[in-house]
Image (cartoon, grey):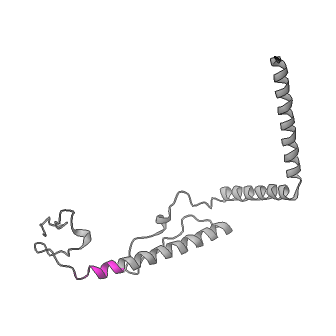
């Protein structure tokens, strides 16, 4: 039986790791000096410059959510709130704002269509005999009582 010295095993592992590190170093050097590697480096640098510019200009919207841009219902319909901040949005921020506006218009149209269907469906519903309020899905409790006066309906 061949018994190996632990120092020899450690030396073999050391040389194996050294060759792996040397080959990884060669791989990264060849990547950085290739066309793809240089383009990745330039792209990372460009994105970092854009990030620094946005931090300096303060053009970020902060923690405002999508729903912070919508006002409550007015006589003219739903209206979008004014822009927060004084800085004009950059190119990418402008694209993002355009996309969010289209998304808001889509969801508002979907909501308005559903709300019109609900109003049409429940427009001729009965009234509560006690208080006279409209009995719809929205003002009846789970145990069939009027949500305003608590009169038993069934």
Left or right of 136? Residue 106 is right
Relative height, residue 20 to residue 128 (above, below): above
Determine which quarter of the picture holds residue 52.
bottom right
Foreground of the two, 14 or 80: 14
Foreground of the two, 3 or 33: 3
Q: Residue at x 85, y 51 (%)?
A: 31
Relative height, residue 116 to residue 7 (above, below): below
Q: Which quadrant is home to the C terminus?
A: bottom left
Residue 116 drawn at (x, y percent): 35, 80
| Magenta segment | 116-124
Residue reaching furthest to the left = 130
Residue reaching furthest to the front = 1
Determine which quarter of the picture holds residue 39.
bottom right
Determine which quarter of the picture holds residue 153.
bottom left
Is 119 a magenta residue? Answer: yes
Relative height, residue 22 to residue 133 (above, below): above
Q: Residue at x 18, y 62 (%)?
A: 143
Prevailing secondary structure class for the magenta stretch in the rendered image: helix
Residue 30 drawn at (x, y percent): 88, 50
Is 27 a magenta residue? Answer: no
């Amino acid at each position: 039986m061949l018994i190996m010295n632990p120092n020899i095993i450690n030396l073999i592992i050391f040389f194996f790791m050294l060759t792996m590190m040397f080959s990884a170093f060669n791989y990264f050097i060849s990547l950085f000096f290739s066309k793809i590697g240089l383009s990745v480096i330039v792209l990372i640098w460009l994105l970092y410059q854009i990030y620094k510019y946005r931090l300096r200009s303060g053009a970020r919207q902060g923690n405002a959510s999508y729903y912070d841009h919508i006002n409550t219902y007015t006589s003219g319909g739903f209206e979008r709130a004014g822009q927060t901040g004084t800085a004009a949005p950059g190119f990418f921020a402008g694209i993002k704002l355009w996309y969010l506006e289209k998304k808001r218009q889509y969801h508002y149209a979907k909501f308005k269509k559903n709300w019109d269907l609900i109003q049409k469906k429940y427009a001729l519903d009965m009234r509560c005999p006690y208080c006279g309020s409209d009995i719809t899905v929205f003002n009846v409790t789970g145990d069939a009582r009027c949500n305003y006066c608590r009169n038993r309906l069934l």
